[in-house]
Image: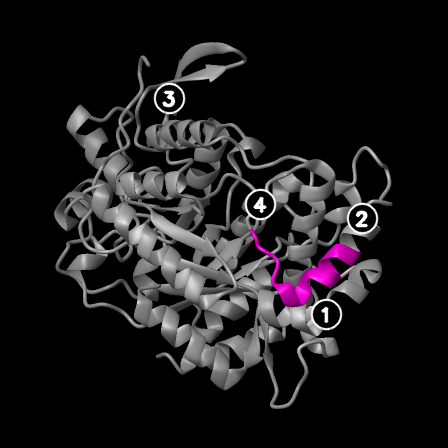
Amino acid sequence: MAGRAKLKAKCPTPSLIAGVMAPRRMAAQPRPTTAKIGRQSERKPSTPHHSPCQRQRQRAALACPRRAGALGCRQHWEEPAMEFGIAMPTDAESWRLAERAEALGFRSAWFYDTQMLSADPFVAMGAAAMRTRRIRLGTGVLIPSNRIAAVAANAFASLNKLAPGRVDMGLGTGFTGRRAMGLGAMRLKDFEEHIRVMLGLLAGETVETEVEGERRKIRLLNPELGLIDTRTPMRLHLAAAGPKARALTARLGAGWINFFSDVPAAIAMLGEMRQAWTAAGQAGAPEATAFVLGCVLEEGEPHDSPRAMAQAGPRAAVMLHRAADEALSGLHNISPVPESCRAAVAGYVELAKSFEPRDAPWLENHRGHLMFVKEEERPFVTAELIRTSSFTATEAELKRRIGDLRDAGYTEFTVQIVPGQEAAIEDWGRIMRAFR
């Protein structure tokens, strides 16, 4: 394909990243402190056109997440302790939660891109960027079909000006945001094309892409004005559940995001991701972020207590929603239903058959998805369903599970905070401190 650039860039050396992407930082420096993460207003603006060699290095730097800020690959640093992050169904005022997460010491705040259910992530991330100084801000994850690649590139570069050195570009083929419109995941071919165009634009390249049915050459025309920041490195992460998506993640040298509830299965998937990483010729190990949702139980507290139902019930309900999607819309279900939960799931599917409008059951099925348990689905969100499908347990048990993930090679543990249950961040912050 004319103008198609290869995306098999390996992680560049620290000197390449520091020299091209952040000329004021040297690879031998320690990880940047809060003061150093802030925008460097004295930095000279970039030139609008880069040499082919510069563009190649810049593209590689954009694609490689395995570095501390703009300083180089993780393999050149002492292995850190398990990092922690939060995720959230985006609220226009999500900056409040991000601000608290930063104060508690969380590394990352991830904002969902679910256009039919919650607020726009870039609006919320922009506000969070203005209220925070250290915490990383990421899309968790961006769905390419929600916006063309040029718009996504511009949005990330705009955010990068507000929060230079702490932007995470998380992308996925789409679950919640697309299921809420009755759609399955987007094609991997289209997903890869979106990433190619987006990274090319951020690297200062002229890229060829399809616009309204025709091939067009496009480029960010005047980044030298400083209205956006395409120079400071941003980390690329992909949510990849299947083998082809994991292979793409490895070819790009990107971070890997895994949504799960079962620790042994998550560890097995990380092993498969590492195999793909090695097969792609990547050195070291991938940066792996675990995404979960759950509740820190008090001793003796049941899994379906009011608090657990509010904080973890929305994750358990996802199993119901998946089963209904499969039965009513023919959408693929990758979550096997445990024998102990089959009666509850079957009962919900029967209920879903009555959802209106009949030709769009997803409108009711996904209302409140990952945010709250609907009154009509409450009888099917059982204690057993919560136990098996979420990270809900006592503090001691959760520490053990997280320790197992850390020992297996996961580098960040991210927990979603449910709207209205923001106080739960204090519980997870307490667990986080045990790993410091």
Q: Which residue is under mark 3?
A: 219
Along the polypeptide, which appears first: circle 1 or circle 3?
3
**Distance of mark 1 from mark 2, alpha carbons?**
17 Å
**Residue lying farthest top?**
214
Q: Relative to 378, is 27 on the left or the right?
A: left
**Residue 180 screen position, x and y as percent:** 69, 41
Along the polypeptide, which appears first: circle 1 or circle 2?
2
Q: Which residue is under mark 1?
A: 382
Q: Quadrant of the N terminus?
A: top left
Q: Residue at x 49, y 82 (%)?
A: 397
Residue 113, disc: 4
Amino acid at circle 3: Arg
Label 4: state its secondary structure.
loop
Front position in the image: 367 or 389 = 389
Placement of 411 over or under 298, stated as above or below: above
Along the polypeptide, which appears first: circle 1 or circle 4?
4
Which tag is nearer the camera, tag 1 or tag 4?
1
Q: Relative to 99, is 80 on the left or the right?
A: left
**Residue lying farthest bottom?**
299
Please state the extent of the stretch shown in magenta in the rendering: 335-347
Label 3: state its secondary structure.
loop
